[in-house]
Image (cartoon, grey):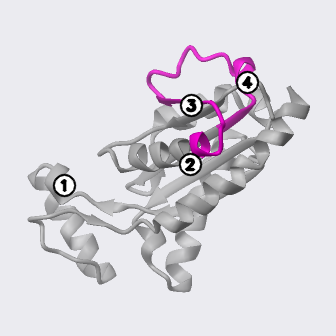
Amino acid sequence: MSEKPCLVLYASNHGHTRKIASRIAQRLRDAQVAVVVTDVVDGVSIDLADYGLVVIGGSVHAGHHQRPLVSWMRQRAEALNARPTAVFSVSLTQSDAGDEGQETAKGYLDALLADSGVRPTRSVRFAGALQYREYNVAIRWIMRRIARKQGLPTDTSHDVDLTDWDDVDRFAEAIGDLVLVAGRVT
C-alpha cells in the first residue's frame, strides 16, 4: 500500500458532485486508504507529489465541465499522467439509458479529457441529480424543461437523486486497487 494519501478533488455547482466525491472518499477510507478531499478552488496550491493516487470529479452544466476544473487539470496534466489517476463525470444525460444519451454523456467526459490533456488510469460517468430546491427560479424552470424532455420527474418541490450509488461504490473499490499501483510508482 502507498504511504501517500489519495487526493479526491472535485468541482460541484449544487453539491451533488461533492456528495459523490465524499462517498468515494469514505469507501476508500473503509478500505484503510488515507484520503484528502477538497474542492478544486481550495486545491489550487496542492502539490501532487504529496499524493499517490488522484481522483478528480466534475459535473456537466450547459454541456461543459466547470472551467476551474478543466484549468486545474490542464495545468497539472503532466503530473497527473505520471501517476494513477481516476476521473469521474456527473451529468443528467448519463441517466438516459438510450444510445444517444450514453453517447452524449461519453462525449462530455471525452471532451474534458481532451481539453485537459489528462489520460486517467480509470474514468467513469455517473448520473447526477435534479436539485430543484437548490436552483434559483430561472434555473429551476430550465431544469424542469430538460427533465420533462428526458422523461424525468418534474415536481420541483423536492430533489431527485438519479445516481446509482452501487456504481459509485464499485468505482471506489476499483480505484482502491490503484493504491497498490501508487505504492510502486511513488
> Mark 3 and mark 1 in contact (Cβ < 8 Å)?
no
Q: Does residue 95 lie above or below 178 as drawn?
A: below
Q: SS for tag 1?
A: helix
| Badge 4: residue crowd in 10 Å (few <14, some 14–19, many ≥20) | some
Q: Residue at x 14, y 54 (%)?
A: 133
- Which of the image's four quarters has the C terminus? top right
Residue receiving disc 2:
27
The residue nearer to you, when weighing 52 against 143, is 52
Is residue 134 found inside the magenta-colored segment of the image? no
The amino acid type, in three-letter code, at marker 1 is Ile
Q: Does residue 16 lie above or below 5 as drawn?
A: below
Q: In whole angstroms, how far apart are the C-alphas of marks 4 and 2?
A: 17 Å
Q: Earlier in the sequence, mark 3 or mark 4?
A: 4
**Residue 66: percent from the left, percent from the top?**
45, 41
Is residue 39 found inside the magenta-colored segment of the image? yes
Residue receiving disc 1:
139
Q: Earlier in the sequence, mark 4 or mark 2?
A: 4
Residue receiving disc 4:
4
Count of numbered marks: 4
- Residue 90 shown left or right of residue 36 in the figure: left
Q: Residue at x 63, y 40 (%)?
A: 55
| Badge 3: residue crowd in 10 Å (few <14, some 14–19, many ≥20) | some
Residue receiving disc 3:
71
Q: Does residue 11 lie above or below 141 as drawn?
A: above
Q: In whole angstroms, how far apart are the C-alphas of marks 2 and 1?
A: 32 Å
Nearer the viewer's eye, disc 3 or disc 2? 2
Q: Earlier in the sequence, mark 1 or mark 3?
A: 3
